[in-house]
C-alpha cells in the first residue's frame, strides 16, 4: 500500500500498535518482524495472516496449549553449522536439540483433526518435515547436561576408564602421604589444595625441606608452602596426559557430530524460522485478545463496513482506566463513498476519522481489529491523509498553501482504490473562498470514485453532501442540555456546530450573542437552528426506539418463560399418566428384586445339595406366593409353639431361627457377617442380621 505522506502511519499512530506487538514477542525473529510490519494488498496473503492470528486466538481463548515455548535465538550457531570445517560445542548442540525437540512437539500437536481444524496454522509447517536423526545423533553423544557421554566412542571410554583408575590410585596414595605428614606435624590447617590442576599438600614453610617433592608455591603470608609429593608426581603426570587425550577425543567427537548435523543445516534454519513465525502469530493473537479484536470478512474490492468499531489505543487506555469506549459504525460502499462528518469541536470527529484509518492499516498488515464479527473490510492500494497543521517552514508555505498542495496531490493521484482522510477541509482561509475550494475538491474526489472521510464546519459542504451522488452526511451527537459531546456518530444527516448554544451555556452576555446573530446571514442561522432541532428530535426518537426495543425484549422473555412453564406442566402430566398406566410402585420393584435374590440363592444351594427335592420344594414355595404365605404362617405357629427367642451371642452350635421363613437350624460355621446354618439336611449361608437365637421350650 502506498502512503501519503510518508508519515501517514505515524499520524494514525500505527507505530504505537507495532510497539505493543513487539512487547508480546519473545524471539528476536518475532520482534524484528513486528517492528518492520508491512502493509499488504494481496487478498490471499492477508486472509492467511488473519486466519493464523484468529486460529491462535481461538486456541488461547479456549485455554489450550500450543507447544511454542522455545525462545532461544541461535541464528549464529545455525550459520556456523553450515560452514565447512566449523566445530560446535556442547551448549550449542543442546540449543539445537531444544530446537528439534520443539519442532517434534509441534508436529505431534498437529494431528489429522487439528490439521483440518487449523489449516492456516498448519500452513507454516507444510513445506518442511520432522527429522528424527537430529535428536538421535545428539542423544548418542551428549547427556541431558550437554556433557559428552563415556560411550560416545570406544577410545573415549578407554581413556575415561584409565582416568578413573589413576585418580582413585592418586587419591589413595595422597591420603597416605597426608596422614604421614599430619602425624609428623608438618601439615598446615588446610591439608591439601590444587595448583595448576595438580594435587598438592599444604605444609608449614619451616618443614618444606623435610618433604620430598615439587614446590609449587607459597601463601601470601609465607607461612604455608604447597608441595606436590614425589610419590604422586608420576601419577599426576599420567592423569595430565590422559586428560589431554580426553580433550582431543572430545574435540574429535564434536567435529564429527558437527559434520553429521551439517547435512541438516538448511532444515534447522527452517525450524528456527518456523519457531519465529509461531511466536509472531502468538504475539498477534495476544494483542487481539487485549484489544477484544475479531476477524472481519475480507473483500477484494474497495469497501468499508465497520460495525461497533473501536480505536484500539483509545480502547486500551479506557480499559486501563476502567472507562467505557463508545463504538462507531460506518459503511462506505459503491453507493456512498465519501462521508462528511460535522459537529462541534471535541465531539469525536478526528477520533472517528483516525479509527477508520488505523483499523484499515492494521487489517492490511495482517492484524485482527477491534470490530464486530459481521464487519466487512476491503483492500485499498493507496491511503492518503491530511490531519492538522502541515505548513512547511522549509519551503515557506502557509497553513492554507500546504493544505492546497496536499489536496492537489489527492486529486491528481486518487482513484477507485484510494482511501483518503481530510481533517477540517478548507480551513485556514476565508470561509466563503475556502468553502468554495472545498466543494471543488470533494466533487473531484467523488468523480474519481475514491473512498474517504472528511470533517468540516462549513455549511456549504453539509448542503453539498445531500446533492452530489456518492457523498453522505454524518454528525457527532451532542448533548445540548448538558453541553457535553456524546462521541457517537449519526450517519445520514449533517450536524450543527452549536456555536450560539455553547456561547449561552458558558455564560457570554446575551446582548453580545444577539449582536453576533444579527451579523450572521439569516438563511445560514435558520439552517443551523434547523440542524439543532433535527438532531434533538432524532435523539428523542432514538430514546423512544430504545424503550420500545426494551419492551419487546421483556415481552419475548415473558413469552419464553411462559412456554417453559407450559412445557414443564405438560411433561408432569405425561409422567403422571405413565405412572398410572404402568402401576408399578416402588414396593413392587423392591419385591421383584428380593425375589431375584432368593432365586439366585436357591440356584447356589441346588449345586451344593444332594437332596434336590427339598430345593425344588423351596423354589415351588417361592414362585407361588399364596401357598408360600400359608406355609410360612403354619411354620411360624409351629416354631413359636416349640421354640422361644432368647438374648445372647450367636456362636457355633447354637440354635437359630431364620427371620424370613421361620425355619430353625444349627450354626455350623461363622464367616464374618454371614453364618452357615444346617436346616435339616441342607446347609445355608445366611446373613447374621437375619438370624435370631432360640431355644426349645420346656415340656409342660
Image (tube, rainbow, N blue to C red):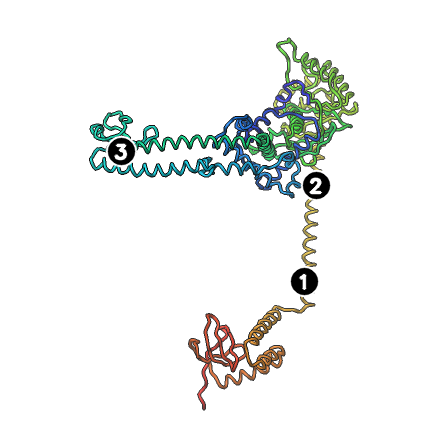
The answer to whether residue 491 is above or below residue 390 is below
Residue 278 placed where, x, y %?
59, 33
Q: Who is closer to the viewer here, 398 or 477?
A: 398
Residue 496 placed where, x, y %?
70, 24
Which residue appears farthest toward the bottom when viewing the image?
700
Secondary structure of residue under mark 3? strand
* Horizontal side, residue 243 vs residue 204: left or right: right
Looking at the rendered image, the quarter that the N terminus falls into is top right
State which tag comes first along the sequence, 3 or 2: 3
* Horizontal side, residue 62 vs residue 516: left or right: left
State which tag comes first along the sequence, 3 or 1: 3
Residue drawn 52% across and 82% down? 681
Q: How crowded is mark 2: few (under 14 residues within 10 Å), some or many (20 or more)?
A: few
Residue 480 in view: no
Disc number placed over residue 575 in the picture, else none: 1
- Per the image, the residue denoted by label 3 is 190
- Per the image, the residue denoted by label 2 is 549
Residue 435 placed where, x, y %?
73, 16
Looking at the rendered image, the quarter that the C terminus falls into is bottom left
Q: How crowded is mark 3: few (under 14 residues within 10 Å), some or many (20 or more)?
A: few
Amino acid at each position: 500500500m502506498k502512503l501519503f505522506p510518508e508519515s501517514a502511519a505515524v499520524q494514525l499512530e500505527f507505530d504505537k500498535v507495532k510497539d505493543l506487538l513487539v512487547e508480546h514477542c519473545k524471539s528476536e525473529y518475532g520482534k524484528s518482524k513486528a517492528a518492520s510490519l508491512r502493509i499488504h494488498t494481496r487478498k490471499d496473503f492477508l486472509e492467511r495472516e488473519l486466519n493464523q492470528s484468529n486460529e491462535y486466538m481461538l486456541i488461547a481463548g479456549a485455554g489450550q496449549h500450543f507447544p511454542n515455548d522455545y525462545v532461544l535465538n541461535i541464528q549464529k550457531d545455525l550459520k556456523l553449522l553450515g560452514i565447512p570445517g566449523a566445530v560446535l560445542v556442547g551448549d550449542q548442540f543442546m540449543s539445537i536439540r531444544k530446537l528439534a525437540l520443539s519442532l517434534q512437539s509441534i508436529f505431534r500437536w498437529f494431528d489429522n483433526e487439528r490439521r483440518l481444524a487449523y489449516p492456516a496454522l498448519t500452513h507454516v509447517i507444510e513445506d518442511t518435515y520432522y527429522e528424527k536423526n537430529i535428536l538421535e545423533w545428539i542423544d548418542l553423544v551428549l547427556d541431558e547436561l550437554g556433557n559428552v557421554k563415556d560411550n560416545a566412542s570406544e577410545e573415549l571410554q578407554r581413556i575415561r576408564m584409565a582416568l578413573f583408575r589413576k585418580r582413585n590410585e592418586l587419591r589413595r596414595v595422597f591420603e597416605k602421604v597426608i596422614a604421614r605428614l599430619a602425624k609428623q606435624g608438618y601439615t598446615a590447617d588446610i591439608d591439601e589444595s590444587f595448583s595448576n590442576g595438580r594435587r598438592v599438600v599444604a605444609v608449614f614453610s619451616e618443614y618444606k625441606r623435610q618433604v620430598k617433592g615439587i614446590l609449587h608455591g607459597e601463601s601470601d603470608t609465607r607461612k604455608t608452602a604447597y608441595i606436590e609429593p614425589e610419590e604422586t608426581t608420576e601419577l599426576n603426570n599420567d592423569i595430565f596426559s590422559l586428560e589431554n587425550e580426553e580433550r582431543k577425543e572430545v574435540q574429535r567427537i564434536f567435529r564429527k557430530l558437527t559434520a553429521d548435523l551439517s547435512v541438516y543445516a538448511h532444515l534447522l534454519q527452517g525450524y528456527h524460522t518456523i519457531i519465529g513465525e509461531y511466536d509472531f502469530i502468538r504475539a498477534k493473537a495476544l494483542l487481539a485478545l487485549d484489544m477484544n479484536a475479531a476477524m472481519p470478512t475480507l473483500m477484494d474490492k474497495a469497501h468499508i463496513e465497520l460495525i461497533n468499531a473501536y480505536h484500539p489505543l483509545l480502547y486500551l487506555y479506557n480499559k486501563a482506566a476502567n472507562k467505557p469506549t463508545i463504538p462507531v459504525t460506518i459503511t462506505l460502499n459503491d453507493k456512498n463513498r465519501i462521508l462528511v462528518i460535522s459537529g462541534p469541536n471535541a465531539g469525536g470527529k478526528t477520533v472517528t476519522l483516525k479509527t477508520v484509518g488505523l483499523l484499515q492499516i492494521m487489517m492490511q498488515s495482517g492484524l485482527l481489529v477491534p470490530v464486530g464479527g459481521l464487519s466487512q473490510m476491503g483492500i485499498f492500494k493507496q491511503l492518503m491523509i491530511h490531519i492538522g497543521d502541515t505548513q512547511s517552514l522549509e519551503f515557506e508555505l502557509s497553513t492554507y498553501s500546504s493544505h492546497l498542495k496536499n489536496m492537489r496531490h489527492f486529486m491528481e493521484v486518487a482513484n477507485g482504490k484510494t482511501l483518503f482522510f481530510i481533517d477540517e477541509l478548507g480551513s485556514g482561509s476565508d470561509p466563503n473562498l475556502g468553502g468554495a475550494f472545498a466543494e471543488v475538491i470533494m466533487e473531484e474526489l467523488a468523480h474519481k470514485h475514491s473512498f474517504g472521510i472528511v470533517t468540516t464546519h462549513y455549511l456549504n459542504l453539509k448542503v453539498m453532501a445531500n446533492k452530489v451522488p456518492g457523498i453522505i452526511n454524518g454528525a457527532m451527537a451532542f448533548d445540548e442540555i448538558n453541553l457535553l459531546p456524546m462521541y457517537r456518530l449519526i450517519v445520514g444527516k449533517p450536524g450543527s456546530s452549536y456555536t450560539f448554544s455553547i456561547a449561552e451555556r458558558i455564560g457570554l452576555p446575551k446582548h453580545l450573542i444577539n449582536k453576533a446573530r444579527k451579523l450572521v446571514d439569516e438563511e445560514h442561522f435558520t439552517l443551523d437552528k434547523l440542524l439543532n432541532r433535527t438532531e434533538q428530535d432524532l435523539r428523542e426518537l432514538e430514546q423512544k426506539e430504545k424503550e420500545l426495543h426494551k419492551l419487546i425484549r421483556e415481552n419475548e422473555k415473558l413469552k419464553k418463560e411462559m412456554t417453559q412453564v407450559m412445557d414443564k406442566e405438560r411433561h408432569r402430566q405425561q409422567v403422571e399418566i405413565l405412572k398410572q398406566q404402568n402401576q408399578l410402585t416402588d414396593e413392587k420393584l423392591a419385591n421383584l428384586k428380593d425375589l431375584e435374590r432368593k432365586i439366585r440363592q436357591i440356584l447356589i444351594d441346588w449345586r451344593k445339595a444332594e437332596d434336590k427335592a427339598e430345593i425344588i420344594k423351596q423354589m415351588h414355595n417361592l414362585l407361588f406366593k399364596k401357598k408360600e404365605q400359608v406355609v410360612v404362617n403354619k411354620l411360624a405357629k409351629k416354631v413359636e409353639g416349640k421354640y422361644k427367642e432368647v438374648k445372647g451371642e450367636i456362636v457355633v452350635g447354637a440354635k437359630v431361627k431364620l427371620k424370613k421363613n421361620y425355619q430353625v437350624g444349627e450354626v455350623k460355621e461363622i464367616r464374618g457377617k454371614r453364618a452357615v446354618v444346617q436346616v435339616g439336611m441342607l446347609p445355608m449361608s445366611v446373613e447374621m442380621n437375619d438370624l435370631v437365637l432360640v431355644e426349645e421350650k420346656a415340656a409342660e
